Amino acid sequence: MHDEHGNNLQKADASKAVQVTGLSGVPPAGNEFVRMESEKEARKISDGRKAGMQREMMRKSKKRDIEGIFQKQIESSAKKSLNLIIKADVGSSIEALKKMLGNLPSDKVELHIVAEDVGQIAESDVYLAEASGAIIVGFHTNIEPHAEPILKELNVKVFKNNVIYHLVDTIREEMRVRLDKIREETKVGEANVIAVFKASTLGSIAGCTVTDGMISRRHAVKVVRNKEMIFEGTIRSLKRHQDDVKEVVKGVECGILIDGFNKIEVGDTIESYEVTYREQQL
């Protein structure tokens, strides 16, 4: 504690202007400054008040920041969201990070800042992140020692870095991995149903001739009737004569048992597809 001339002070009387260093963060103007008997007692009260403020903030903004987020996800399943809690050394660092995050593509994944504050990452931040499903982002700041075990216990993600571009890249990747993979189908074969055999223990077995490509047990199939798909599923059994086979090629007759479908009819077409999943980009 120093006076206006930079001299060290042990105490300050009422209305005395002083400069205080050593705080873990920058308090907002107008906050109350209270002297405590020990650092332990001060930290306990500080953490309690901060946790209470976070809970109050969550209560007031519940519909807007949490329930509202979930409602948007229900209304638009195509658009994902990523919740963030931002902690930094000073307010200008927070604003700089928010500005760069605002430039990230948001057509597929929307960023929601649940909370932002100056100072180290504290226990209350971890609990808020766990409650809101958020990731904690630390810019030019550290994690308070007593918050470390809670992070591990609650499995809350924390990304911290002193380089803003690295943080933005990390958040961009977190947005990308939230995107569902795109299903892609490649037609590999087709067979016409020329007979249907009933088996009491198995169901309806389609006697088929492969007319194009090949039919494989590992591929997905569609049943087409009058040019309309009536069923999509997988092959339970594929036989050539009495033998189980993995695949049958064009021009060969076979027996196909489709898992979960017993309404196959003569004249239906069974189409075989290879299904792959491709990762999306923002």
Image (cartoon, rainbow, N blue to C red):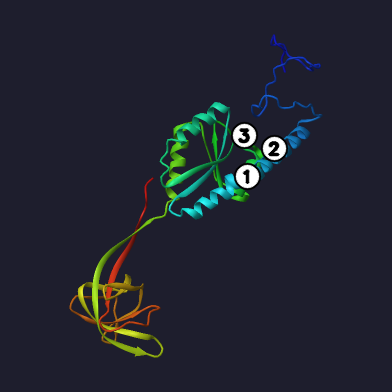
Query: Residue 62, percent across and down?
Result: 62, 46
The amino acid type of the residue labelled 3 equals Gln
- The residue indicated by pointer 2 is 50
Q: CA distance from mark 2 to mark 1?
A: 11 Å
> Could you tell whether 123 is left or right of 247 in the image?
right
Residue 104, picture quadrant: top left
- The residue indicated by pointer 1 is 128
Q: Nearer the viewer, mark 2 or mark 3?
A: 2
Residue 123 makes an appearance in the image: no
> Who comes first in sequence, dot 2 or dot 1?
2
Kindly state the secondary structure of the residue where label 2 is placed: helix
Query: Residue 231, percent across and down?
Result: 35, 74
Residue 129, picture quadrant: top right
Query: Residue 3, percent across and down?
Result: 72, 12
Kindly state the secondary structure of the residue where label 1 is placed: helix
The amino acid type of the residue labelled 1 equals Leu
Q: Residues within 10 Å of mark 1 (few under 14, many from 20)?
A: many
User: Is residue 57 placed above or below 204 in the rendered structure?
Assistant: above
> Could you tell whether 29 is left or right of 78 in the image?
right
The amino acid type of the residue labelled 2 equals Lys
> Who comes first in sequence, dot 2 or dot 3?
2
Query: Residue 281, percent across and down?
Result: 37, 47
Residue 264, picture quadrant: bottom left
> Could you tell whether 229 is left or right of 24 in the image?
left
* Depth check, front residue: 148 or 185: 185
Q: CA distance from mark 2 to mark 3?
A: 12 Å
- The residue indicated by pointer 3 is 120
Kindly state the secondary structure of the residue where label 3 is placed: loop
> Who comes first in sequence, dot 1 or dot 3?
3
Q: Quadrant where the N terminus lies?
A: top right
User: Is residue 25 placed above or below 174 in the rendered structure?
Assistant: above
